[in-house]
Amino acid sequence: MKVFLCWSGKRSKETAEALSEWLPLMIQAIEPWISSYMEKGKRSESEIANVLEESKVGIICLTEENLSEDWILFEAGALSKSKDSHVCTFLLDLTPSDIRQPLAQFQATQSNKEDVRKLIRTINQAVKEMDEPSLTEKRLDSLFNILWSHLEEKLQEIIALGPIMEKKEKRIEYDKMTNEEAISKFVRDLSLGGRSRHTKKSYRLTIEKALRFLGKNFSEVEKDDLESYLFFLQEKDYSPTTIHRHAYALKAFFRFFGSDLGGRIRLPPLKQKSPVVLDMEEIRKLLNSVKRMRDMAVMHLLFAPGLTVSELINLNTDSIRGNEVRVESGKRRGEKFFLHDGTLKLILRYLEKRKDSNLSLFVSKKGRRFSERYIQKMIQDNVAEAGISKRVTAKTMKRSFSYHFSRKPEEISTSINSSAERFITQS
């Protein structure tokens, strides 16, 4: 089933492209169609109408900068003439009260978890009405809980590219602040936004390093200064990916203080890499390589529900609620995720065999909460034991499970559950 995605402007287009990549992971019957497939100026009403005849759902990607753009209004007008189609606006960093007619006539979907969940249910119903393969409500919700973070991360990156907002409270006497005061203020804002300890530390170190190199107060930094710093990193043989990561941190820092410096710097091109995904045989080998019950429980949580390392090490024994696990830290704090039967039994069996009173869900031999480095080494050791040559991280494991669950949910779920059996049955 075709889903029509219309856009106007850089952030709107990137939002449409993010949805285009994500929607088929949720429902394989979906065939996204982005109006960028036609060159701007050639997207005539008749051509759009031809596509709309085959489309059951239309999504208009709105950002602050395109609310009155001619192209978005033109395509929205064409969409509104389509019969028997569900048309909605997808709001990036906007609220329904920001939308005026004629765009306000459409059902608005905000870019948060619950609104997107409602949208995907509507699309699934449209798929069902067309007698194409749809998902049961239980499977749809389970898959959504696993895959939502993929879309959320991308949307947050796009939001960060947005227009500079004049926020006077952030401009008050900032030129009188020291670099350390400014960095601390920025990192404190990251904390309020639910960013992980790892993210805050990474941003702080990156910004401190850049300002040390420049040798001036952050309020005096200019575009040429930032480019000279990034050129320095390039001369030191930093990879383009690392340079982009530094630039992203600096862009976020200066945007916080109302400057668009970071948005105007030139960067070396990034090579498009295909994301690493383990095939089913590699997943089975990796799980079979695990020798300890505790480590197998850790690996399960990294695969599905796909917790981050930071989220995993901050779990407590009371984070397990029924057949769900509740995240205790980071931006997903308070969110709950479904556990496979084998994973739940494995965790309960592990806790039953533990003799300590530590409240941490997972502890080392010395009875201490795991560190991020401990988990990373655990992954590396088991990957080596399994003879897998690919570079595997916690994100690789989450991505691999999501990929196979969207295609062969029974096969991957069986592998997860069966890998727990040899530990559950131990006396």
Image (cartoon, rainbow, N blue to C red):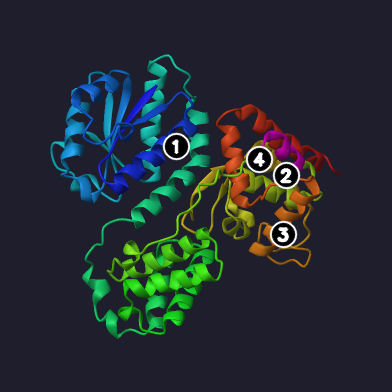
Q: Is mark 3 on a helix, strand or loop?
A: helix
Q: Which of marks 1 and 4 is nearer the N terminus?
A: 1
Left or right: 242 as drawn, with respect to 172: right
Marks 2/3: CA–CA distance? 21 Å
**Residue visible at 78% across and 59% down?**
355
The answer to whether residue 338 is magenta is: no
Callout 2, which amino acid?
Answer: Leu
Mark 2 lies on residue: 346
Q: What element carries label 4?
A: loop
Mark 4 lies on residue: 278
Left or right: 60 as drawn, with respect to 19: left
Callout 1, which amino acid?
Answer: Glu
Check disc 4: other Cα within 10 Å, few if <14, some if 14-19, many if 20+: many
Quarter holding the N terminus is top left
Q: Position of residue 254 (x, y in %)?
A: 34, 70
**Dominant secondary structure (helix, strand or loop) of the stretch shown in magenta:** helix
- CB-based contact (under 8 Å), mark 3 and mark 1: no
The one nearer the camera, 8 or 403, is 8
Mark 1 lies on residue: 21
Q: Which range is magenta?
A: 279-287
Front: mark 2 or 4: 4
Check disc 2: other Cα within 10 Å, few if <14, some if 14-19, many if 20+: many
Image mark for residue 377:
3
**Residue visible at 70% across and 62% down?**
374
234, above or below 159, in the image? below
Left or right: 68 as drawn, with respect to 136: left
Callout 4, which amino acid?
Answer: Leu
Q: Earlier in the sequence, mark 3 or mark 1?
A: 1
